[in-house]
Amino acid sequence: MPLLQVLRPTLPILVGASMMLTLSMGLRQSLGIFLQPLTHDIHISVSDFTLALAVQNLAWGFLQPMAGAMTVRYGFRPIMVVGALLYIAGLALMTTAHGLVSIMIGAGVLIGTSLACTANAIAMSVAARAVPETVRSTVLGIVSAAGSLGALVSAPIGQMLNEGFGWRIGLAGFVILSVVMIPTAWYAGRVDKMPLPKPVGDDIGNATAFTAAKTAFSNASFVVMTCAYMVCGMQLVFLTTHLPSYLAICGLDPMLSAQTLGMIGGFNVLGSLFFGWAGQRWNKLALLGAIYIFRSLALAWYFMLPATPASTLLFGAIMGFLWMGVGPLTAGAVAEMFGLRWQAMIQGLAFMSHQIGSFLGAYGGGLIYDSLGSYTLAWRIGVALGLAGGIIQLAFALIRPSQPPLLKAA
């Protein structure tokens, strides 16, 4: 049966989840554009700003399992709509900030809490519940791809407003974009009316939240995936936070940072589609390991050479292709291992590790730069840990292989 025909009954849900995800992630990934003008204007350091983003990542990570568990009790719609409102409030507080406290609460606490309710884990869980298992990985790739378009749109808009009217107007433009999250979250919430499939195999649908979490951490494959996920967060948030600053230090056009983030967003679409398709056919955990290894090699290549517009855009394309492909692979792996009922919570537990890495990438990168005046040590650490995490993930997946859905169906 053609994919479109299979998905037609659930298209409003999938479109809503995709739009919510693209705004949630796109706006967040573009905040680094405002690092230099904002810190100079309100007299805070680079490490202060990155500390706020680090708090955002910790709030997102540690509240994600709670948000996932709450969807089991209250449904997805109220959680997502409240998350959208918190995002608007966080950006509005940043827009009017005159010191560190407003940035810490707005960019850190409020947006971090919102991301736990509107970003990958929740959007992917909505999409996974809405479609059959035989097309689930492909659909998760499509939703992740659609979610990747946010940076492609928001980064250039934010940079143009920032250069033309100042950083406050740039953030005000982000506030307007974030309002669209409310109706998209509402439409995605239609998934609450869809019944869960009957439990099969190792499905833990009837377990309590505590039992589901205990079962997850008793699974060796899940534990290895969770540990490797930390390196993923460290690398990605280091780039989104510090790449604009690095390019400014290299004396390159400020618009290049927005163009590079846009390039990441554009190639993210291709990568998400590819890895969603690939996860339907090959071992998802092995694919994750390959992503981490190739990302690390790309980081080493770029930072070892003098930065130029051409090398920066090519680097953005490579990293974009390897960026959010982890989303459909991780979500699909969790659904295969544990079923759908507790997917958002268990995926959130794995995401806590990702966000610890994000904290280290954002704040650690800022501390290293403030201490040494250079990002050299930061990217070297990112490359070394990325290679180690990727090799361990790939080796473990090959030692304990699992069958993808298409082979099971056959």
Image (tube, rainbow, N blue to C red):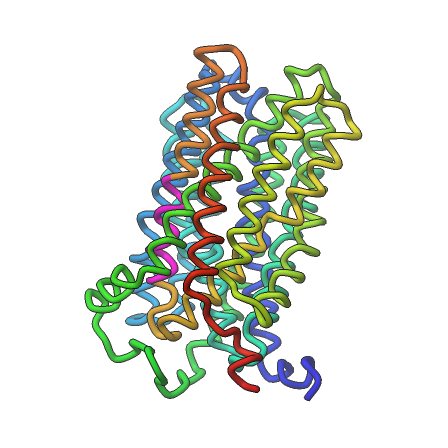
Residue nearest the viewer, comparing 199 with 67: 199
What is the magenta segment's predominant secondary structure? Answer: helix
Residue 349 among those drawn in magenta: yes
Q: Is residue 239 left or right of residue 247?
A: left
- Residue farthest top in this picture: 372
Q: In screen coordinates, is 156 left or right of 117?
A: right
Q: Which residues are magenta?
A: 346-356
The residue that appears at 47% across and 25% down in the rendered structure is: 365
**Does residue 55 appear left or right of residue 331 in this picture?**
left
Query: Residue at image x 40%, y 36%?
Result: 108
Looking at the image, which is closer to me, 172 or 246? Answer: 246
Q: Is residue 23 above or below residue 74?
A: above
Image quadrant holding the N terminus, namely bottom right
Residue 164 placed where, x, y %? Answer: 72, 26
Residue farthest right in this picture: 310
Q: Residue 86, percent across and down?
A: 42, 49
Q: Nearer the viewer, residue 189 or 8?
A: 8
Does 223 appear above or below 409? above
- In screen coordinates, is 160 left or right of 90? right
Q: Residue at x 57, y 86 (%)?
A: 410
71 falls in the magenta region: no
Q: Quadrant of residue 301?
A: top right
